[in-house]
Amino acid sequence: MALKPLHDLYALNRVVVSTYQSVTGTGQAAVKQMFDEREGRPSSPVYPHKIDQNVLPHIDVFQENGYTKEEEKMMKETKKIMDLPDLKITATTVRIPTMGGHSESINISFHNEPHLSEVREALDAFPGVIVQDDPQQNLYPMPLTSHDKDDVFVGRIRKDDSIENGLNIWVVADNLRKGAATNAVQIAEKLVENGWFQ
């Protein structure tokens, strides 16, 4: 999502993504498990471990290479969506006990030096992206504040001085709206706009 305007501005070299995904991504049974655990009720678990007050570095099934199916899918889909089949990308996907809102910590290295003011401008100008980046005022994206919104929120934009031309960003979106329903509506709108459907 937030990578496209950055690639248009600077050529991507490598991307490292860690996701923190809500239990709503697994469905109603997972939400029930979390609240049953929270309220001390017997539960039919969906996850292999307790999810309330816990973090599981495990979404979908593990593959022989040690990655999960979700991680493999994320890496492949990012390359496909961005039309960058040779992009170096790695991912870790994590399930967290929140009600809605998927978050991502993204570390990017570019072929040329990113300038923070240009990065912020590019993200801010991209449709559907809202920059919330004022750490001094404790303003940054969170699942709670992205709830029921169609936008993608980006913050914590800062240089990574440990690598050449590195950048860190934090991205949050309501997975039930942006990740599913909104994307479907926006695709349909684009098809109508381009005359594919009347």
Image: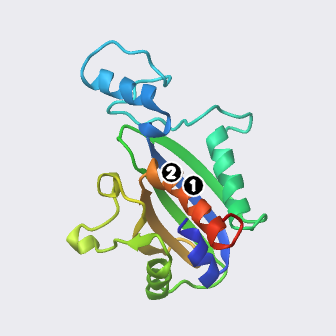
State whether residue 46 is above or below residue 185: above
Q: Does residue 154 appear in the picture of this structure?
A: yes
x then y, percent, for residue 97: 37, 37
Residue 184: which disc? 1
Please tell me which residue is depicted at 40% across the width and 71% down the height of the picture: 130
x then y, percent, for residue 181: 50, 51
Query: In the rendered view of the protein, which quadrant contains the C terminus?
Result: bottom right
Q: Are marks 2 and 1 in contact (CB under 8 Å)?
A: yes
State whether residue 58 is above or below residue 160: above
Q: Residue furthest front?
A: 198
Around disc 2, counting alpha carbons within 10 Å, would you say few (fewer than 14), some (14 to 19), or many (20 or more)? Answer: few
Residue 70: which disc? none
State whether residue 115 is above or below residue 44: below
Residue 181: which disc? 2
Please tell me which residue is depicted at 66% across the width and 59% down the height of the picture: 78
The three-letter code of the residue at mark 2 reads Ala
Please tell me which residue is depicted at 67% across the width and 47% down the height of the picture: 73
Around disc 1, counting alpha carbons within 10 Å, would you say few (fewer than 14), some (14 to 19), or many (20 or more)? Answer: few
Q: Does residue 67 appear in the picture of this structure?
A: no
x then y, percent, for residue 149: 37, 58
Q: Secondary structure at mark 2?
A: helix
